[in-house]
């Protein structure tokens, strides 16, 4: 039974304030969770409540959200059973009452929703992934989609595509896949250094060189895969997050770094050529969130060959996802709990995707904390894929380290999604 809820304004990996909540139970157990924050956010995401007071953190303070946690939310949840996540989250939604969580703030709601799950798992003396998951289905470690080259809104370089990721899928165990990805990361650093590029990193821990365009970025990554001793494609494939809403304007896709402008059909062609020339098995937000006609074209053209992931497109929202499924748009969804605001709604989006044959990829945000809840979420749901950054910066590697600990704890029961996670395309 919940006895108290406290919150703290902490810092995220970009030096912006964010919210951490601690839920305490009458058993003496407690659970703590912190919420992340995006930079290239979808327009239809649940609202992140910021103070707007320019004298504190440039207006980004979260003291109002904090007050909502310790005030109305704590009062409403006091005496409730923390094990009943569905009832807790329903109460949170009801208390907020708005469609976009703008009354209390999605950051306030999510911090409490996640902290409640942690508290319940602690009280039950089981790891979070067991509390959230279904032991009869088994526990599967996800393939990491590692963002080794950062661009777009995550770096101030010339790369228009926001994320160029490596996907170490052709391995037996998560630990082996991660180690391979780390090997490529280090080989890429050496290669960039040799070619005279800086080896400083962007928001998600990947390198951020001023490359001439997407192809040069992918060529460097492929060379790093080979230098690290792995086979491009069959062992380590590539994935992109275009975050195309960021460079879509008036029906045109404008790659400023490459100095090119495309119509939606031309941009589909640009992506199709990349898929033809590189071992790319996943493209996220290849079209802008408000360009559903473009999404239709892209899905017709590439939907049988590669995973097409809706991030800004679906914003972890079942209403939007169901419309996308109905129209046959995309074939996968990125899952970010803070886009929707509660754990239960996050799980509902994953379940809807699963039933429709859409893949789910559990994801971090570009602004992160040490919170590792998403690692447990990926294992609990056996979704098969996690996107949580490169192999540097503790805000990224904490999630990988948590997955290593889970794999060891599961021992012989640990499965790894591997190449099967991508078999349907
Ligand atoms: P964001 O980026 O957290 O800045 O929105 C991540 C993504 O687009 O996947
Ligand atoms: Zn994205």
Image (cartoon, helix red, strand yellow):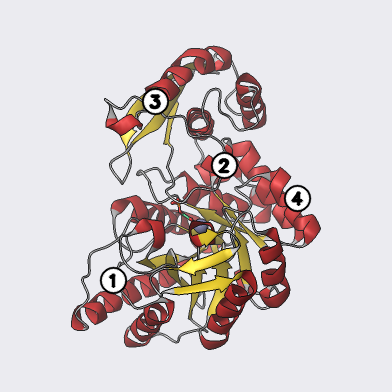
User: Do residues under tags 1 and 4 come within 8 Å of each other at their CB atoms?
Assistant: no
Say which residue appears at 30% left-offset and 33% top-offset.
58
What is the x, y in percent for residue 48?
A: 48, 34
Say which residue appears at 38% left-offset and 47% top-offset.
367
**Which label was assigned to residue 149?**
none
- In 3D space, how far apart are the residues under numbered discs 4 and 2 (Cα atoms)? 16 Å
Q: Secondary structure at mark 4?
A: helix
Say which residue appears at 41% left-offset and 65% top-offset.
147
User: Do residues under tags 2 and 1 come within 8 Å of each other at their CB atoms?
Assistant: no
In front: 43, or 84? 43
Q: Quadrant of residue 166?
A: bottom left
Q: Is residue 294 above or below residue 128?
A: below
User: Do residues under tags 4 and 3 come within 8 Å of each other at their CB atoms?
Assistant: no
Label 3 or label 2, whichever comes before in sequence order? 2
User: Do residues under tags 1 and 3 come within 8 Å of each other at their CB atoms?
Assistant: no
Q: Secondary structure at mark 3?
A: loop
- Please rate how many residues cluster around mark 3, counting C-alpha atoms within 10 Å: few if below 14, some from 14 to 19, many from 20: some
**Residue that badge 3 annotates:** 51
**Which label was assigned to residue 209?**
1
**Which label was assigned to residue 322?**
4
Closer to us: mark 4 or mark 2?
2
**Which image quarter holds the C terminus?**
bottom right
**Residue that badge 2 annotates:** 45
Label 2 or label 1, whichever comes before in sequence order? 2
What is the x, y in percent for residue 227?
A: 32, 87
**Which image quarter holds the N terminus?**
top right
- In 3D space, how far apart are the residues under numbered discs 2 and 1 (Cα atoms)? 30 Å
- Please rate how many residues cluster around mark 2, counting C-alpha atoms within 10 Å: few if below 14, some from 14 to 19, many from 20: many
- Please rate how many residues cluster around mark 4, counting C-alpha atoms within 10 Å: few if below 14, some from 14 to 19, many from 20: some
Label 1 or label 4, whichever comes before in sequence order? 1
Q: Secondary structure at mark 2?
A: loop
């Amino acid at each position: 039974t919940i006895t108290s809820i406290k919150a703290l304004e902490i810092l995220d990996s970009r030096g912006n304030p964010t919210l951490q909540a601690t839920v305490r139970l009458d058993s003496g157990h407690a659970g703590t969770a912190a919420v992340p924050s995006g930079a290239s956010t979808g327009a239809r995401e649940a609202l992140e409540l910021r103070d707007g007071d320019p004298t504190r953190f440039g207006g980004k303070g979260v003291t109002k959200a904090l007050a909502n946690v310790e005030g109305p939310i704590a009062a409403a949840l006091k005496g409730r059973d923390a094990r009943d996540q569905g009832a807790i989250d329903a109460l949170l939604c009801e208390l907020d009452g708005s469609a976009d969580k703008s009354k209390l703030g999605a950051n306030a709601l999510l911090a409490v929703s996640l902290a409640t799950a942690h508290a319940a798992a602690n009280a039950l003396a089981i790891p979070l992934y067991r509390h959230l998951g279904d032991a009869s289905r088994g526990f599967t470690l996800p393939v990491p989609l590692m963002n080794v080259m950062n661009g777009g809104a995550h770096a101030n370089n010339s790369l228009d595509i926001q994320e160029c990721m490596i996907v170490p899928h052709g391995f037996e165990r998560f630990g082996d896949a991660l180690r391979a990805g780390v090997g490529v990361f280090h080989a890429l650093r050496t290669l960039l250094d040799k070619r005279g590029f800086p080896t400083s990193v962007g928001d998600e821990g990947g390198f951020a060189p001023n490359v001439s365009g997407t192809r040069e970025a992918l060529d460097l990554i492929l060379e790093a895969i080979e230098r690290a001793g792995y086979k491009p494609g069959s062992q380590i494939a590539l994935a992109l997050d275009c975050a195309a809403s960021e460079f879509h304007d008036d029906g045109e896709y404008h790659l400023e770094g490459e100095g090119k402008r495309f119509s939606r059909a031309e941009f589909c062609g640009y992506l199709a050529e990349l898929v033809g020339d590189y071992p790319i098995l996943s493209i996220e937000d290849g079209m802008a969130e408000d360009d559903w006609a473009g999404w239709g074209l892209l899905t017709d053209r590439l939907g049988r060959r590669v995973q097409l992931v809706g991030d800004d497109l679906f914003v972890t929202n079942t209403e939007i996802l169901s419309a996308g499924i109905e129209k046959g748009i995309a074939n996968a969804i990125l899952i970010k709990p803070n886009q929707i605001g509660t754990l239960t709604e996050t799980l509902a989006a994953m379940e809807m995707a699963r039933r429709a044959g859409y893949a789910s990829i559990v994801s971090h945000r570009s602004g992160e904390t040490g919170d590792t809840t998403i690692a447990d979420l990926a294992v609990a749901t056996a979704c098969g894929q996690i996107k949580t950054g490169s192999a540097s910066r503790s805000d990224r590697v904490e999630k990988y380290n948590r997955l290593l600990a889970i794999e060891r704890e599961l021992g012989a029961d640990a499965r790894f999604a591997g190449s099967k996670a991508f078999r349907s395309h």
